[in-house]
Image: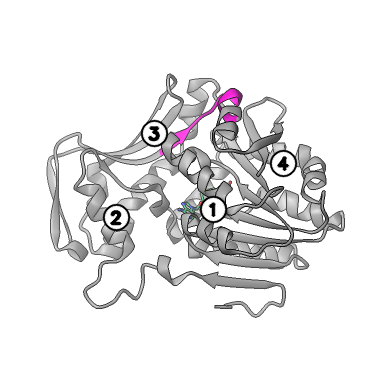
Amino acid sequence: MNLNPASHININVNSTTKSSDPAPQALSPFAIDIRKGLWARPKKIPSKYFYDEIGSKLFQDIMNLDEYYLTDCEYEVLDLNKSQILDHCQRTGGFDIIELGAGDGYKTKVLLRHFLEAGADFTYRPVDISTEAIDGLVNTLQQEIPDLQVNAIVDDYFQALNNLKAEDAKRTRVVLFLGSNVGNLKFVEVVNFLEKLKAGMKQGDLLLTGFDLRKDPDMILAAYNDSKGVTAQFNLNLLNRMNRELGAEFDLSTFKHYPFYDAINGEARSCLVSKVKQSVYIAALDDTVDFEVAEIIKTEVSRKYFPGQVEALASRTGFSTVAHLFDAKKHFLDALWSA
Ligand SMILES: C[S@@+](CC[C@H](N)C(=O)[O-])C[C@H]1O[C@@H](n2cnc3c(N)ncnc32)[C@H](O)[C@@H]1O
């Protein structure tokens, strides 16, 4: 479905991922995941549900926080290495970029602008589960880089992987998986994801993935526990989203944002903790979920890597490492792999 009149930009919405317009009596995908997650032990909510309209805006605020070093570090990686990245992308001529979980594309635009200025022949296909993120990205691309060929897609990137395999791609495809996207997957999920991705790529296609590296544990924890409380709002917005979309009756003042970093396994985790014993009605499920005092809901994991673990992940999933690209302080790594 082309929702955009601009000549270079299309937006496609994969109807299987939309939570609106369910069949009569059918539960939305969000409601199904909440029923599964809040009745599990420990309770959990998939982090992809952070990104409704309010969550996507809050994430942009997070990226501007002093404590959230990840954005500046990866921006620097891409800026320092954009010519080298382009050389690899256009080794066989024209190429097509597919970005999974594109968000607002702030860092990707460093590459897109450079590639256009260098006269490269390429297209850009951002995929994001959030309609608001894709709409915002398309608007800014129209204004800032109007000559870019864009085919934007609202979809779950796990679904987008299936489409990669089905495509009859003639040119090199360059898949971008930037920011903390890979970090949000558990180790077993990362391996499954990369193996599936590899199966959908043809020989010579490239993958550029962002890995936040191990560093001072206090610096890592501060990125998820900022002094202005924006990350707390972002986390608590999940409860708001359930109130808005599922008719839930969460009282936000009875939950707190609780992040912690385990420097042994490199996992930064965000949780919501119930301050009281309570029961919360969720109209869409016509059911009530019970919380003990101090019971948690797991909402996000952000895994931090050593460069050696990134290398091992490439071999384990059948990719070859083309380059490891760093910022000046070596806080962040973008790994360029070839299928
Ligand atoms: C942490 S942000 C990173 C955005 C961007 N890649 C960056 O580095 O700034 C994660 C983005 O991935 C999207 N996302 C999360 N889970 C997704 C999924 N399963 N499928 C597609 N997009 C997803 C979110 O909507 C959000 O825009």
Q: Which residues are magenta?
A: 301-310
Cβ atoms at labels 3 and 4 below 8 Å apart: no
Q: CA distance from mark 3 to mark 4?
A: 26 Å
- Percent across and percent down for residue 311 are 61, 28
Residue name at image x 13 percent, y 55 percent: 288
Looking at numbered disc 1 in the image, what kind of residue is underneath it? Gly
Crowdedness near tag 2: few (<14), some (14–19) or many (≥20) residues, C-alpha within 10 Å: some
Looking at numbered disc 2 in the image, what kind of residue is underneath it? Asp
Q: CA distance from mark 4 to mark 1?
A: 17 Å
Which residue was labeled with disc 4?
78
Q: CA distance from mark 2 to mark 4?
A: 35 Å
Looking at numbered disc 4 in the image, what kind of residue is underneath it? Leu
**Residue 307: in magenta span:** yes
Residue 269 marker = 3
Q: CA distance from mark 2 to mark 1?
A: 19 Å
> Which of the two discs, 3 and 2, labels the residue nearer the N terminus?
2
Answer whether residue 328 is visible to the viewer in this image.
yes
- Percent across and percent down for residue 16 are 41, 68
Q: Is residue 52 left or right of residue 310?
A: left
Which residue was labeled with disc 1?
101
Q: CA distance from mark 3 to mark 2?
A: 20 Å
Residue name at image x 58 percent, y 78 percent: 2
What secondary structure is marked by label 4?
A: helix
Question: In the image, is residue 221 above or below residue 53?
Answer: above
- Percent across and percent down for residue 15 are 44, 72
What secondary structure is marked by label 3?
A: strand
Query: For the view shown, which residue lies furthest in the bottom direction?
Result: 5
